[in-house]
Image (tube, grey):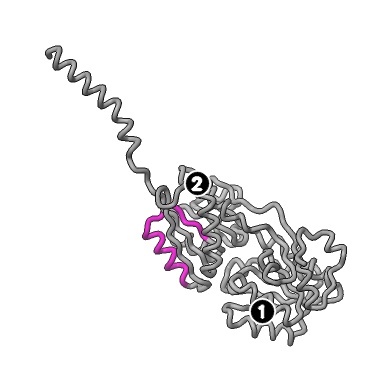
Amino acid sequence: MSSISGNIFVWVLAFLLITAPIAQAQQPKKISRIGFLAGSSGASGERNLRVLRQGLQELGYVEGKTFTVDYRSAEGKFDQLPALAAELVRLKVDVIVTQGTPAAMAAKNATKTIPIIILGGTDPVATGLVPSLARPGGNITGVTIMNEELVGKRLELLKEIRPKDSRLGVLWNSANPGAAAVFKRTESAAHELHLSLQSFDVQTVNELQGAFDALTRNGVNGLVLLATVPITDHLKLVADLAIKHRLPSIYDRSDFVAAGGLMSYGPNTSDMPRLAANYVDKILKGANPGDLPVERPTKFELVINLKTAKKIGLTIPQSLLARTDRVIK
């Protein structure tokens, strides 16, 4: 090989070595595809999705450049969830975020390989989603509310407001397996507190008025609301009906109190989608969902609406107000 040819070879080789990393760096990054499956109304799902997007952006993701979202909502019609979950699987999303227990169960039945991140819902162990919170295994992890652990406290709060009243009603949707688990625990807690409990199964918004009329006819003097469709999608209507029928009511989330409900006791759920974004980030970076413990809330708040108490002719004991985290006047 001549010296000229040798020099040309060296220069070409040097050029390739220098430009190869640049060319590699310029290769387009993979856009992660995130599926979001909601069982409740579009308003509720879109609100949680908005916070999830914000959480991802805070972690450095850019929608349209590093991730996209495929959103599906059953609008409270749980029988549509299996088809919607199957659709997300066909789209080959990289991860599925589910809102509520019915959506999580539909996703679990649809895939054993795509990572699933639960957002809210009841105890995933009790509903069979995971075998353990600390070691969920399989393809499921996420953030849970653990509502059933707090039902006894909610019954105690109602009893503290009206010590002589002992007939409570429970408004829930038996089609929701998560609500079924919470209702079972509510029955046990009521028995321990020597309270009479009446079940009112409501599966559509059109049944709410009739349920409240039945509550009044049956002499119920307090109401426990379980977080499920149609209650979650119509909090203002439920709050107005409780006021109309002069029923002290308690829910697990403060948005009910903001809508005019009397009282709530439970975790602050507004930031939970942001926590779910952390799970999405870890999984997209290679973490195994089965190795990520399911997160549960550790702080709970009691919120009372004094305007509503006045409307239904109720005086909240000072001892209870002193323990209240937030009061709406």
Q: Is residue 310 magenta?
A: no
Quick check: 105 above or below 217?
A: above
Quick check: 157 above or below 134?
A: below
**Residue shown at 45%/53% (left/top)?**
95
User: Local crowd at mark 2 within 10 Å, few (<14), some, or many (≥20)?
Assistant: some
**Residue shown at 87%/64% (left/top)?**
318
Is there any visible trace of residue 113 in the rendered image? Answer: no
Question: How many numbered circles are shown?
Answer: 2
Task: Name the amino acid type tagged 2.
Answer: Asp
Residue 251 lies in quadrant: bottom right
Estimate the spatial distance between the alpha carbons at disc 1 and disc 2, rounded to whole Å.
41 Å
Label 1 residue SS:
strand
Residue for badge 2? 281
Instruction: Magenta stretch: give its range.
Output: 80-98
Quick check: 307 above or below 280?
A: below
Image coordinates for residue 201, horizontal then vertical, percent: 63, 78
**Residue shown at 46%/43% (left/top)?**
286
Image coordinates for residue 248, horizontal then vertical, percent: 76, 74
Quick check: 13 above or below 272?
A: above
Image coordinates for residue 162, horizontal then vertical, percent: 84, 73
**Residue shown at 48%/67% (left/top)?**
73
Task: Name the amino acid type tagged 1.
Answer: Phe
User: What residue occupies the far top of the structure in this picture?
Assistant: 3
Residue for badge 1? 200
Taking depth in this image into account, of 309 and 250 the one nearest to the observer is 309
User: Local crowd at mark 1 within 10 Å, few (<14), some, or many (≥20)?
Assistant: some
User: What residue occupies the far left of the structure in this picture?
Assistant: 2
Taking depth in this image into account, of 246 and 89 the one nearest to the observer is 246
